[in-house]
Image (spheres, rainbow, N blue to C red):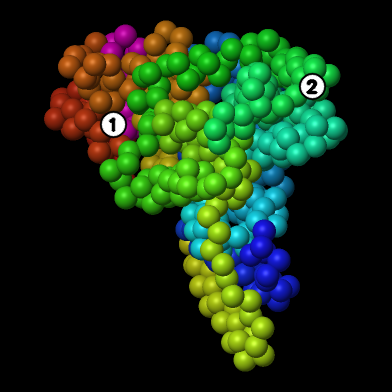
Amino acid sequence: METERSLDRFTKGCILAMLLGAVAVVVLSFFSGGLCGNDYWWHVKAGEWMVKNRQVLRQDVFSWTMRGHPWIAHEWLSEVCFYLLQAAFGDWGVFGFAAFSALLMVALMVASNRKKLYENVVFSMLYFILFGAVACIFFYGRPHVFSFFLLFAELACIYSFLRDKDSKRIYGIPFLACLWANLHGGSANLSYLLLLLLLVSALPVRKGFGRLEFLALKGREALRLAGVLLLTVLAICVNPFGLKLLWYPYEQMSDAFLTSAIVEWRAPDAKEMGNLVLFFFPIALCVLGMLLSEKKVRCFDLLILFFFLFLFFRSRRFIVLLDIASSFWAFDYVLPCRLKPITKRSERVLAVACLTLMIVLGAGYVGKRMVGLAREGTVIQQELSQGMLDLVKKEAPQALFNDYGLGGYLIYHDIPVFYDGRANDLYAADGIFRKGVALTLLNGEKGDVLVDVEETVEEYGIDAFLVQSACPLYHYLCSHEEAYERLLEEDGTAYFRVL
């Protein structure tokens, strides 16, 4: 805290402006390349169906393989929001939502640490710039964006309780849980798991053990916290699907095939430079700070770290949750790095000039990329060329086998699919998801069983294929011209008619 007091308002203002400006340039420059369309399209279509039919989807209406089968649309409220946003403002509305959400999250994290940023300016710059780059990967038109903010809100309530046991914010968690269950029910269980970790951190009788400090609760405070935990569990059940959402997330996370077949569900690979810099390096910085600091380590901070590390090592998509959670404790353990105040007039003029130059150059660079994006006209990644889309509509196959990643875009254009991004949410029944992946890769779950394409075509009555040219199935279809006619191939995707 000595470092913070030694800095005058001008110096701190320059540091904050430089930090926010650098993060904004990083975030907006990444977003100026357009948004990822992964799963966005079927979410919008589901929202459209619910708005037009004035009811929550409870069964599949988009595929030809599972039509009419029960489906838990656990993100129904987000899907409605995305459809209304798309209907009102088009693709640019969704683009603005994604970019604004990423910037807002950074701003919230900075604001929650506004008194600690100046303890180590180098750490603060690295932390938030790297988070800004990570946010560009995961903040787009998907319901999980709402989960990021709900997680931040709940942790803000919990850490307010840690600072002051009489804080009333803790009572807001059940309301957050109810909202969570309807916006992104698949991760709503985090709302009570975090409270459970908080109670666990107060279990030991001893106040501390070495540098580890446990949460000391009086009987009344413990009962109050237990009551909030119970209300949070009950609040999750206030959704169109009731109690089912309590065990739904565990069914998904326990499926090893799901986590291996879908890229975003896979464990992070430290051998990839991008993962090493964006994912592992910030974690190492935070952990080292906790280890090297002479301060007491709160048991809850340690539990939060282990919990989100466990999720992250199972799936790279949890890195954002880990980063958001770490913002509540990482700056408490950062090693101080003293910064000299800017007091001389010449130094202040130079600082203002440098900041102005950075802002002008950053704004110019981002503006140029945004203009290029506007001219290109593709704000959200289009999974198929217009020519390919027109061909599929013209052919109108009754039983189209599509590549998994193309399903959502086909649904958006009212084309029934074999399967799509709902994966095991829907296609676990009858093994559709596993069969689709196996057919695309031409091998079974263990990778040593060759799939009989002709048998699968006959089993499902497949009359056309829409696959990416990089997959093994594409090469199989090309090598059997007597059975499959390639009508069109564009942008790495090919359409085959079954003869």
Question: Is 426 positioned to the left or the right of 239 in the image?
Answer: left
Q: Residue 322: x and y, percent?
A: 53, 38
Is residue 98 visible to the viewer in this orientation of the structure? no
Can the viewer see residue 212?
A: yes
Residue type (three-letter) at the residue carrying disc 2 = Lys
Residue numbers of the magenta segment? 456-467
Give the residue type at disc 1.
Phe
Q: Nearer the viewer, mark 1 or mark 2?
A: 2
Residue visible at 24% across and 16% down? 446
| Residue 460 part of the magenta segment | yes
Task: Look at the picture and state if 220 lies above or below 165.
Answer: above
- Residue 58 occupies quadrant: top right
Q: Nearer the viewer, residue 59 or 437?
A: 437
Provide the residue designation for mark 2.
Answer: 218
Q: Which mark is residue 496?
A: 1
Question: Helix, strand or loop at disc 2?
Answer: loop
Residue 291: % across, % down:
47, 43
Nearer-the-camera pick, 479 or 470: 470
> Which image quadrant for residue 190?
top right
Quadrant into which the C terminus falls: top left
How far apart, in angstroms, are the residues tagged by discs 1 and 2?
69 Å
Seen at 68% across and 70% down, the residue is: 6
In this view, 287 is above or below 104: above
Q: Residues within 10 Å of mark 1 (few under 14, many from 20)?
A: many
**Residue 170 pos. (x, y %):** 79, 30
Q: Quadrant of the N terminus?
A: bottom right
Looking at the image, which residue is at 26% across and 38% down? 469
In the image, residue 138 sits, relative to residue 246, either above or below, namely below
Q: Are marks 1 and 2 in contact (CB under 8 Å)?
A: no
SS at mark 1 in the image: strand
The location of residue 396, given as percent across then percent down, is: 43, 28
